[in-house]
Amino acid sequence: MGIFSKDRELFKPEYNHQYTIHSSSYKSDNQKEVTLEENITNRCPIDNLQKIWAKNFIMLTMLPLLFIASIGLLEAYIGSEFMVLTVTILFLIIYAGIWLQNMHMKDKLVNTYVDRKTKFYELLYKRISEKYTVSAECADKINEYIRIFPKKYKIHTVLKEITGIILFFVLFMVCITFFIGLFITKSLEKYYPNNSYQAIIIIIVISGILSILAYKFFIINPLKRKNEIWYEISLFEKNVTDTLQQIIPDNDANKKTVNYPVDKTLKQPFALYFIVSIVTGFFFIIWDYQMVMAKQKYLSKAYLVEDYFADLIRNEY
């Protein structure tokens, strides 16, 4: 299962003690040239992912409860409408800020990794090409992988989701407003005969279609992208690893067979999770957790492959 199989071991047992998972913060700095070893050391932390999610979860669930309690106390002991309004506005600002931070965190979890891993492949390929003979085909493949990795797999869903929420809300309110107008128009039609309700129906239909499109492209698509991103990255990195392995001669004593960790469980059943989330609300919390923790699940194995290549190069120099 996973990166191991009976006939394709990632590492032989006697080598296992040589490979460790390092976890420390990584800050991209285009002005600073780092070595392959520094890149390995400065990997994205994986041990803190669960803590990050738990902190956001507590904030998102506890704040509404504190808000409800605060409103109840204000009405019971102070009875000031101004204070209630002030607390409500303050709560909405803080809560919206936490949601934005939570959304940004999910993008950053992916983008930080892609930035560092792109540099990792650049440095690794440079070291490998200095030692081994690289065919033109492999060289073209690796250079193409390095070029498209950040372009294809970095995600920017926050702005899309905010835009989608605003558009959907505005269009939804337009529909409601004209629905009310439709009923008023039809009720007054016997006193003031006209065809204005037909125009209202057209506006409602157009607004409804635009709402669906906004929901699809600005909310559904970003969610689906985040839901599948680590599975897609694993498929991409498998191709990179296979190409790098082709460069290393089979008679190299340090070469090992790599069964890259492509795990289908990283790809959650989007339609099921999304529908159940809408129906229950609570299930979205589980889905959110799965999307965040997919990184920890993937990197706990993907980092071993990085260690293998780094150790291979170290042994050759």
Image (cartoon, grey):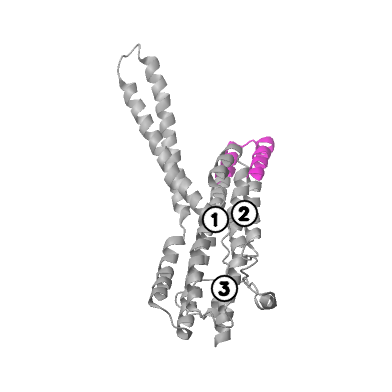
Mark 2, Cα crowd under 10 Å, few <14 / some 14-19 / many 20+, is some
Residue 113 position in % (x across, y down)? 53, 66
Residue 201 drawn above or below residue 70 = above
Q: Which mark is residue 56?
A: 2
Residue type (three-letter) at the residue carrying disc 1:
Gln
Residue occupying image coordinates x 59% and y 58%: 294
Viewer-side residue, 112 vs 184: 112
Most common SS among magenta residues? helix
Q: Is residue 42 visible?
A: no
Residue range of the region highlighted in magenta in the rendering: 64-89
Q: Which residue is mark 3?
A: 306
The x, y position of residue 45, in whole percent, is 61, 67
Q: Position of residue 134 (x, y in %)?
A: 43, 80
3D distance between C-alphas at marks 3 and 1? 30 Å
The residue type indicated by label 2 comes to: Asn
Q: Residue at x 57, y 55 (%)?
A: 264
> In the picture provided, is 40 more to the left or to the right than 125?
right
Q: Which mark is residue 111?
A: none
Looking at the rendered image, the quarter that the N terminus falls into is bottom right
What kind of element bears circle 2? helix
Residue behind mark 1: 101
